[in-house]
């Protein structure tokens, strides 16, 4: 069976109107994987969701207006890696996370959702800005 | 944002004609719901049959609708929620917060005095 090896790099403006485009690319990836035994419908929704939540957090909190965002999606075998690179001031993930998702707070569930769906989530500085990095074994 | 409004008995039925409810259109929906409440609407039913994707920002807009209904002694119900969208409510543990019905008629029937457990999706 063919082993998955996919590397995508996409640059988009820092605007929420592109959330659907990137989310749909994530969904399509789920349908096109060659050797995934799980429920592709669920994987497609979850990739769409993780990409949407990651981009939304960076767009809203990283202070990178009028700059491009770089989205890198990599699948090697059963290892999925998603990176969202920004050139803003950055943010602290804990500051933008609702402490208790069962509260009726209207914001702050995005990082909670990413943490629930991915194996690891990290946001750190790089020499060119910041990167939100998420990994998962498929 | 593409939304249509219809008055049914004493309820206002909203049909959301978008595939996605996310950070791009959630603020618009939140403001729209608030304007309806401010203009005197008491009972809102939101038909989500065309919505196949909701993110946390979309959930935030729905929570705002729910909370504003509570503040006005009103009602905010959701109808025709697709299964993947329903999973978002479960993931974020909000299933017990919202009134969710399989169909618009179920939501209207409960609003007219029916029993929630007859038709409500728990």
Image (cartoon, rainbow, N blue to C red):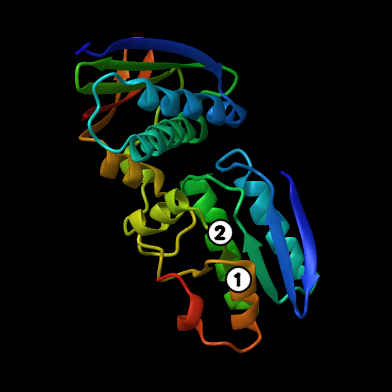
Which numbered marker is on residue B62? 2
The Cα atoms of the two marked residues, 1 and 2, are separated by 9 Å
| First in sequence: mark 1 vs mark 2 | 2
* Secondary structure found at label 1: strand
Q: Alpha-carbon neighbours of circle 2 within 10 Å: few (<14), some, or many (≥20)?
A: many
When the figure is inspected, residue A13 is found, relative to residue A90, above or below; the finding is: above
Q: Are marks 1 and 2 in contact (CB under 8 Å)?
A: yes
Closer-to-camera residue (B18/A65): B18
* B8 sits left or right of A25 in the view: right
Q: Quadrant of the C terminus of chain B?
A: bottom left
Which numbered marker is on residue B76? 1
Write down the chain letter for disc 2.
B
On the image, the x and y values in percent for residue A27 come to: 43, 29
Residue A42 position by quadrant: top left
Give the residue at the far front of this rendering: A1
**One can see residue A89 in this view:** no
When the figure is inspected, residue B13 is found, relative to residue A99, above or below; the finding is: below
Closer-to-camera residue (A6/A96): A6
Write down the chain letter for disc 1.
B
Give the number of marks.
2
**Residue drawn 33% across the image and 23% down it:** A82
* A51 sits left or right of B39 in the view: left
**One can see residue B76 in this view:** yes
On the image, the x and y values in percent for residue B35 come to: 75, 62
């Amino acid at each position: 069976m063919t082993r998955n090896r996919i590397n995508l790099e996409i640059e988009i403006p820092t605007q929420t109107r592109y959330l659907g485009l990137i989310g749909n690319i994530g969904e399509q990836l789920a349908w096109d994987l060659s050797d995934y035994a799980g429920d592709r419908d669920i994987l497609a929704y979850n990739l769409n969701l993780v990409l949407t939540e990651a981009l939304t957090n960076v767009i809203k909190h990283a202070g990178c207006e009028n700059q491009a965002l770089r989205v890198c999606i990599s699948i090697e075998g059963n290892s999925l890696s998603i990176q969202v690179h920004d050139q803003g001031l950055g943010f602290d993930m804990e500051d933008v996370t609702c402490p208790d998702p069962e509260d009726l707070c209207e914001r702050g569930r995005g990082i909670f959702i990413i943490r629930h769906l991915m194996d690891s989530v990290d946001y750190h500085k790089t020499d060119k800005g910041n990167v939100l990095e998420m990994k998962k074994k498929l | 944002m593409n939304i249509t409004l219809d008055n049914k008995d004493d309820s206002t039925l909203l049909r959301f004609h978008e595939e996605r409810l996310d950070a791009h259109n959630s603020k618009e929906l939140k403001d729209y719901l608030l304007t309806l409440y401010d203009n005197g609407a008491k009972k809102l039913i939101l038909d989500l049959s065309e919505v196949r994707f909701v993110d946390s920002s979309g959930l935030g807009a729905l929570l705002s609708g729910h909370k504003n209904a509570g503040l006005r002694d009103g009602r905010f119900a959701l109808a025709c929620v697709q299964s993947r969208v329903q999973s978002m409510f479960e993931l974020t543990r909000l299933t017990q917060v919202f009134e969710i019905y399989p169909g618009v008629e179920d939501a209207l029937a409960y609003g007219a005095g029916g029993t929630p457990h007859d038709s409500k999706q728990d």
